[in-house]
Amino acid sequence: MVNSNGLHHISKRKRVHNNLEEYPHPQFWIRFLDKLLVLVAILGPASAIPQVLKIFLNQSAVGVSLFSWTLWLILGVPWLIYGFVHKEKPLVIAYSLWFVMHSAVVAGVLMYG
């Protein structure tokens, strides 16, 4: 079913109407994708751990852009709110963790930059 509203909430199973999808989904690939996204939601933010460790262990933020990390922090907030509003577990996990990682880098740049 194509949604004519454009940017309306994508996940049909969360909509309140008569044609709710089953959860967990009966199709293997969709179930697999649901589980994979939770893993990706954790692994993505974990990719910033080396940057955070480098800043705090070396006590130096030379070459780290305060503007970029602050912008990523700010731009992640609407996604986090969207995840909470639409009860999308992968988005809430990912953007909560990204918020922590971005905040840590920004704090490190402010302390050691």
Image (cartoon, rainbow, N blue to C red):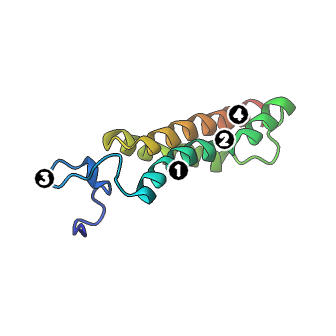
Helix, strand or loop under label 4: helix
Which is nearer the N-term, disc 2 or disc 3?
A: 3
Q: Picture coordinates of residue 103 (x, y %)?
A: 61, 35
Question: In screen coordinates, is 19 left or right of 103?
Answer: left
Work out how far the residue at label 2 is from the one at label 4, CA to CA, in angstroms: 21 Å
Disc 3: which residue: 18
Disc 2: which residue: 46
Which is nearer the N-term, disc 1 or disc 2?
A: 1
Question: In screen coordinates, is 66 left or right of 88?
Answer: right
* Tag 2: amino acid: Ala
Work out how far the residue at label 1 is from the one at label 2, CA to CA, in angstroms: 15 Å
The structure residue drawn at horizontal position 49% and vertical position 38%, both measured from the top left corner, is: 93
Q: Give the crowd class for mark 3: few <14, some 14-19, many >=20 residues within 10 Å.
A: few
- Which quadrant of the figure contains the N terminus? bottom left
> In this orientation, which residue lies closer to the viewer: 92 or 12?
12
Work out how far the residue at label 1 is from the one at label 4, CA to CA, in angstroms: 35 Å
In the picture as drawn, the residue positioned furthest to the right comes out as 58
The structure residue drawn at horizontal position 57% and vertical position 41%, both measured from the top left corner, is: 98
Disc 4: which residue: 110
Q: Picture coordinates of residue 99 (x, y %)?
A: 55, 37
Disc 1: which residue: 36
- Mark in front: 2 vs 3: 3
